[in-house]
Image (tube, helix red, strand yellow):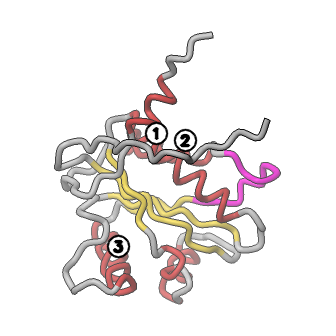
């Protein structure tokens, strides 16, 4: 058995980036990242999470501004750190494992982005955003039916900083019950 595995190595080397260039990755790359996300494991294979890909700068900036207000930062702060794309993951409110399922979608997308040379960062407050009428209307305008809960924003783009390295792992986090 060969324990050298590129997937595990990618898991160990992927880090969140908090400074992005304005250049948008090609649509094919964004689509590949989303594809990895929607192949995430889900409770009873319900696939109860969806992705809204925001590549429109005006909409991205509007979401960032509201996210900033929710987070309580000073006006002008960008909680997306300049990332030109936000892949918003939402979970079906009527499915009991949707938050877990959506979290796996987020993880898959961040890992896929890393393997494709694209930086990423999980940005919170999607839950609060999609409780607002404005964002419920956005979903309706996109043809999305049902009740959805924001899980997270996967901010993606090209890093405008050195690649972060993983800090050492904390000890005493694994317990075997043999």
Q: Is residue 44 magenta?
A: yes
Q: Is residue 100 above or below residue 62?
A: above
Name the one closer to the observer, 47 or 134: 47
Q: Which residue is mark 3?
A: 59
Tell us which disc is closer to us: 2 or 3. Answer: 2
Q: Tell me if mark 3 has few (under 14), some (14-19) or many (20+) residues whose alpha carbon lies within 10 angstroms of its own.
A: few
Q: Earlier in the sequence, mark 1 or mark 2?
A: 2
Q: Earlier in the sequence, mark 2 or mark 3?
A: 2
Secondary structure of residue under mark 2: helix
Q: Earlier in the sequence, mark 3 or mark 1?
A: 3
Quarter occupied by residue 90: bottom right
Q: Tell me if mark 1 has few (under 14), some (14-19) or many (20+) residues whose alpha carbon lies within 10 angstroms of its own.
A: many
The answer for how far apart the CA atoms under marks 3 and 1 are is: 24 Å
Which numbered dot is residue 90?
A: none
Name the one closer to the observer, 13 or 175: 175
Residue 132 x/y as whole percent: 52, 87
Residue 6 x/y as whole percent: 47, 23
Q: Are marks 1 and 2 in contact (CB under 8 Å)?
A: yes
Q: Residue furthest right?
A: 44
Please indicate whether residue 40 sits to the left or right of residue 163 in the image: right
Q: Is residue 87 above or below residue 74?
A: above
Which numbered dot is residue 36?
A: 2
The residues colored magenta run: 41-50
Q: Which residue is mark 1?
A: 112
Q: Is residue 48 above or below residue 132?
A: above
Residue 22 x/y as whole percent: 20, 56
Q: Is residue 171 magenta?
A: no
Tell us which disc is closer to us: 3 or 1. Answer: 1
The answer for how far apart the CA atoms under marks 2 and 3 are is: 24 Å
């Amino acid at each position: 058995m060969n324990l050298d595995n590129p997937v595990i190595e990618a898991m160990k080397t992927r880090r969140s980036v908090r400074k992005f260039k304005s250049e948008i990755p090609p649509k094919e790359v964004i689509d590949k990242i989303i594809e990895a996300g929607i192949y995430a494991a889900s409770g009873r294979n319900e696939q109860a999470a969806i992705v809204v890909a925001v590549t429109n700068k005006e909409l991205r900036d509007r979401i960032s501004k509201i996210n900033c207000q929710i987070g309580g930062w000073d006006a002008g702060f960008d909680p997306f750190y300049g990332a030109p794309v936000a892949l918003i993951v939402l979970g079906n409110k009527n499915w009991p494992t949707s938050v877990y399922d959506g979290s796996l979608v987020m993880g898959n997308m961040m890992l896929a982005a890393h393997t494709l040379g694209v930086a990423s960062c999980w940005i919170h407050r999607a839950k609060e955003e999609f409780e607002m009428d404005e964002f419920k209307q956005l979903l309706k305008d996109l043809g999305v039916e049902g009740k959805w809960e924001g899980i997270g924003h996967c901010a993606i783009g090209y890093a405008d900083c050195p690649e972060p390295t993983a800090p050492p792992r904390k000890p005493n986090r694994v317990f075997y019950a043999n």
